[in-house]
Amino acid sequence: MRITNNMLISNMVRYIGNNLFRMEKYQRQLATGKKIQYPSDDPIVASRALKLRTDVSEIEQFQRNVEDAMSWMEYTEKALESIGDVLQRARELAVQGANGTYSAEETQKIMDEIEQLKNHIIHTANAAYAGRYIFSGFQTDKRLMNDDGTFAIEVSNSEEIKFEVGIGDSINVNVLGGDLFNSGADVGAGEVGTAPPGSMIDVFNRLIAGLQSGDNTAVGDLLNEIDEQFNNVMRVRADVGARLNRLELTSNRLENDYLNFSKLMSKNEDADLAETIINLKNEENVYRASLAGGARIIQPTLIDFLR
């Protein structure tokens, strides 16, 4: 087989191009810090990278869900704390109103304060987090109570709002209005002024009526009911606290998972800079040698033979 000058030049250009491609590969790894840029570079690494990236994305979403759930429940816990304080103050005022030693003017002041406490509970029942009413079950766009303390919507105790905080793991974040304000019973809506109020508001209404009529015995009899309402609030608050503790544990687990999967993803994708630099210098030397060899091949001309 006769080796022609064109064959030498063609092979030389192809080999130099291959050397340049390998050098560019390591230059790209050094610039991006990644082993591969395209799936064809290493299909196994690319496949594993897609799986790990998916896992990390899921963990990040679960972390956002946990943060939102914790914010919702912390806001709810503050509302429950406020309601508990109101009931404690209402009990103190009921004790004062039941002893029968206060003048009509002093009794009126007690009534006025209890009325304000009742309004505060109604306002708290309509508390909203990020534009969503926290005690209204699934109907987060509607407030729970009317201004007179009657329920504005129907809420079943099965209307639990759940956040997904892990694969196959979810937690309900809401407290239902019936469980808190109606002693655990479902609530039903009616026209303002006609529907019966929840049991908590009913205690305040009867307390005000007893003070207004001067029936000290009736006021004293309501102390046990106030205690029952307070105990119910503490029960609900304890449940919220338990769920918050679980979210704290879940948040810690997700943080550890995120670190572990990010480390695995880094090991799978990131290039070893020291090794990459060595390979780059090696390919650069090969490329320079191929250029020098090529220059020697295409150097001879007719003039060179006439010297």
Image (cartoon, rainbow, N blue to C red):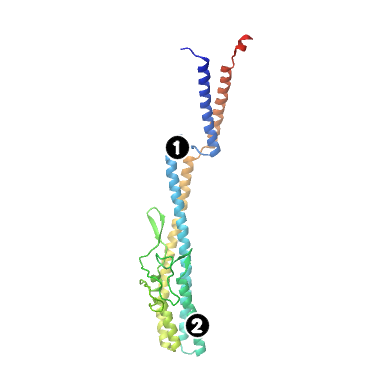
Q: Nearer the viewer, residue 13 or 61?
A: 13
Asked whether, in this view, residue 112 is left or right of residue 183, the answer is right
Q: Is residue 144 above or below residue 221?
A: above
Q: First in sequence, mark 1 or 2: give its number.
A: 1
Q: Percent from the top left, x then y, of residue 292?
A: 58, 21
Q: Secondary structure at mark 2?
A: helix
Query: Element under label 1?
Result: helix
Q: Is residue 253 visible?
A: no
Say which residue label 1 marks.
39
Q: Is residue 101 above or below residue 225?
A: below
Give the residue type that dot 1 points to: Pro
Neighbour tally class for label 1: few under 14, some 14-19, many 20 plus, Cα within 10 Å? few
Give the spatial CA distance, label 1 vs label 2.
74 Å
Looking at the image, how many numbered discs can be counted on the residues? 2
Amino acid at the residue labelled 2: Asp
Q: Residue furthest right?
A: 307
Residue 286, quarter of the rendered image: top right
Q: Residues within 10 Å of mark 2 (few under 14, many from 20)?
A: few
Query: Residue at (49%, 79%) from the top-left corner?
Result: 116
The one nearer the camera, 200 or 4, is: 4
Q: Is residue 27 visible?
A: yes
Tell me what residue is drawn at x 50 percent, y 86 percent: 108
Name which quarter of the figure residue 43 lies in.
top left
Checking the image for residue 226, the label placed there is none
Residue 4 lies, in percent from the top left, at 51, 14
Judging by the rendered image, the residue that carries numbered circle 2 is 112
